[in-house]
Amino acid sequence: INFQLLNDTYNPNDALTGMITDASGNLFTCGNFSLVNYVDRESLAAINLNTGLPTSFSPNPYVGSGGDGYINALAIKDSILFAGGYFTNIGTNAAARNNLAAVNIKSGKAASWTANTNDEVKRLAIKDTILYAGGNFTNFKNKKLNYAAAVSTGNATLLNWNPNLDNTVNALL
């Protein structure tokens, strides 16, 4: 990784909230930004670590009829990037997804995997084939779950894990 090149070229126009790398040498970043190195990238971008420049990956999360959505957290499993935040649509196919989505890391298209929440997802973590999500939500896949949930990374099956928390989750390990 050429950190100097990355520092000189990355240049988002607002805050970052998360970063993760994939096996292909890309750095995925999320936050409140709308530009990366003067290229339109709404809250989610991939940076080639060899060049320091944004890739064509551009799933552009948004709310409603085009309002700005944002991404708080990222996790990767194989060729799928899981993104959590506050949005109603995501992907190059503008798929309806509420606050949590699976996106193909090559195409930026939202996968068929669906695990909607009723409010913001703040953090994600993966262990084996389980995606853990935490945030402000109290409903996950149409089931009452307070602030934390576990779901299969493969088919979005909600798992029988319910810590029944009494406040927002701001961190997962």
Image (spheres, rainbow, N blue to C red):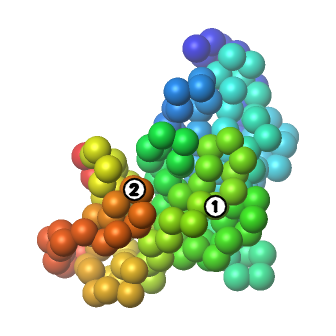
Residue type of the residue flagged with mark 2: Thr
Few, some or many C-alpha atoms within 10 Å of disc 2 (few <14, some 14-19, many ≥20)? many
Give coordinates of residue 164: x percent, y percent: 16, 77
Q: Earlier in the sequence, mark 1 or mark 2?
A: 1
In the picture shown, does residue 101 fall above or below 19?
Answer: below
Residue at which label 1 appears: 110
**In the drawing, what numbered circle is on residue 120?**
none
Q: Residue 84: x percent and y percent?
A: 49, 61
In contact (CB < 8 Å): disc 1 and disc 2: no
Q: Quadrant of residue 153?
A: bottom left
Q: Which element is circle 1 on?
A: strand
Residue 128 in picture, x, y percent from top left: 28, 44
Q: What secondary structure is marked by label 2? A: loop
Q: Residue furthest front?
A: 155
Residue at 58% in and 73% down: 97
- Tag 2 residue: 153
CA gap between label 1 and label 2 equals 14 Å
Find residue 109 and report its image quarter. bottom right
**In the image, what residue occupies the spot 69% across and 51% down?**
108
Crowdedness near tag 1: few (<14), some (14–19) or many (≥20) residues, C-alpha within 10 Å: many
**Looking at this view, is 6 or 74 the one in front?**
74
Could you say where residue 145 lies in the image, as x and y percent from the top left?
A: 27, 80
Residue nearest the viewer, comparing 111 with 148: 111
